[in-house]
Image (cartoon, coloured by chain):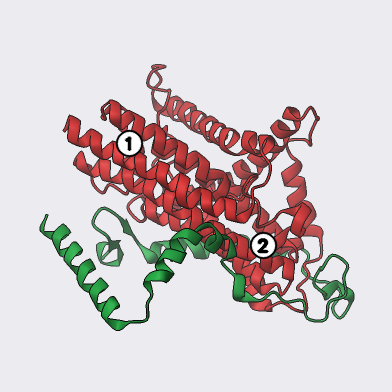
Chain colours: A red, B green
Amino acid sequence: MSGWAILGQAVLALVGGGIVGLLYRGLDRKIAARMQARLGPPLRQPFLDLGKLLAKETVIPKTAVAWVFSAMPFVAAIASFTALLYLPWGPFGPILEGHGDALLVLYLLAVPALAMALGGFASGSPLGVVGAQRELVMLVSYEFPLAVVLVALAWRLSTLGIAPAFSLGQMARYPLWGVVGPLGLIGLVVLLVSLLVVTPAELAKIPFDIPEAETEIAGGLFVEYSGTYLALFYLADAVRTVVMAGLVVALFVPYGIAQPLGLAGAAAQAVDLLFWLAKVFGVMAAAVTTVRVGMARLKVDQIARGFWWRVTAVALSGLLLLALDKVVSG
Amino acid sequence: MREALTVLTGQGYWSPLIWAAAALGTFLLAGLLWWRGRREYKRGTEQELPFVSGERVENPRVGALHLYWGLTEALRPLLERLRGWHSGVVNDYAGWFVVVLGVVLLLLLL
């Protein structure tokens, strides 16, 4: 593929990822409102919010370390958006396939959280610092089970002779559901559950929204952010949601429907792309929207304890089941 | 040339320069958004003071002492046990080193 074609696809993916992320935000708010017997805002509300933020003053507090405070929204946006380029988009492989694997996506997903924490620390606000502390505690809590899920899948793929096993494109091309035995199937379900529990934490949504916790610490690490900087964080968060859901889809449900429907060519690609978007929305609705409507905010030590002991144990048991399945079925 | 610029990790890989190029492109897009936004504010006014729920606080700082409070609280049983093992006697530490080295060698041999 020529450099210009890659550039064109990259621009499409970046703009498309931003639009899909904002659209999901609107859908998330709409579904949540309906679940609470409210009408909710229109679907385009996140686009209006973004426009409104761009029209607001961008204040840098007197107590802030100005350059860190100003740089972090950019760092978060860059990490979130570039992660889109390493993600399979339904029938299309990752745009930068061969240049970055699933571990890179994992790191790129962690960078916005670190950037938000650094921004909170740099704001010089006590509420921002408390939010940043909570963000860091959450980050070191959920990263381990997330890594276990990824390593378990890559290890099982490598035992099938598929290399490089950490390639997201390969993971999406060779789903494990059809090649493992009964124990392996249970292991995969357990790993999927672990990943779905990690998803709202990765995105800092209820019940894991302690770094912001509007009713308690007035927005926490975002308390001093306004205008354009807040708009960049807002956009980065929307895109990170797409990346996280896209990762779940690539790892566990990478299937298309064009082939069973007997479609081919451009029509097949279009149908599979739409189906991929539907799956991404499905994952987001299941792991984020319904959970945030049905649960209350957890405390920081509850989250750390939950991830370090329970979710890690669940993820490790999934890995163990996959290993046992390999021993039993060969 | 392309392979030389890629970091290979056995079953994984990444090209820092390709990522840097993508990051530069994304930075330009983010910069465009920043440029379109409103960047000014009223300097030297109360607008610049950090929000502390309407309170007048002289030095609104939070100490770093409890940075990982939630984590240490969650892992307290484990941390207390680990602290108990820190006897301060160098012989104990050397003993631990030998035991761990033995376990690692055993695993490597297996």
Residue A258 against residue A82 in the figure, above or below: above
Q: Which residue is mark 2?
A: A131
Mark 1 neighbour density, 10 Å: few (under 14) some (14–19) many (20 or more)? some
Q: Nearer the viewer, residue A174 or B76?
A: B76
Q: Quadrant of residue B12?
A: bottom left
- Residue at the (77%, 74%) spot, across then down: A61
Kind of residue indicated by mark 1:
Arg
Residue A35, percent from left and from top? 72, 28
Q: Is residue A289 above or below residue A235?
A: above
Per the image, label 2 sits on a secondary structure element best described as helix
Mark 1 or 2: the one toward you: 2
Mark 1 vs 2, N-terminal side = 2
Residue A258 shows in this picture: yes
The spot of residue A112 in percent (x, y) is 56, 59
Q: Secondary structure at mark 1?
A: helix
Please, which chain is the residue tagged with disc 2 on? A
Q: Residue furthest top?
A: A261
Which residue is at 50% across, 39% downward?
Answer: A196
Which chain does the residue under circle 1 lie in? A
Image x and y of residue A204, in percent = 61, 51
Q: Where is mark 1, residue-wise? A: A173
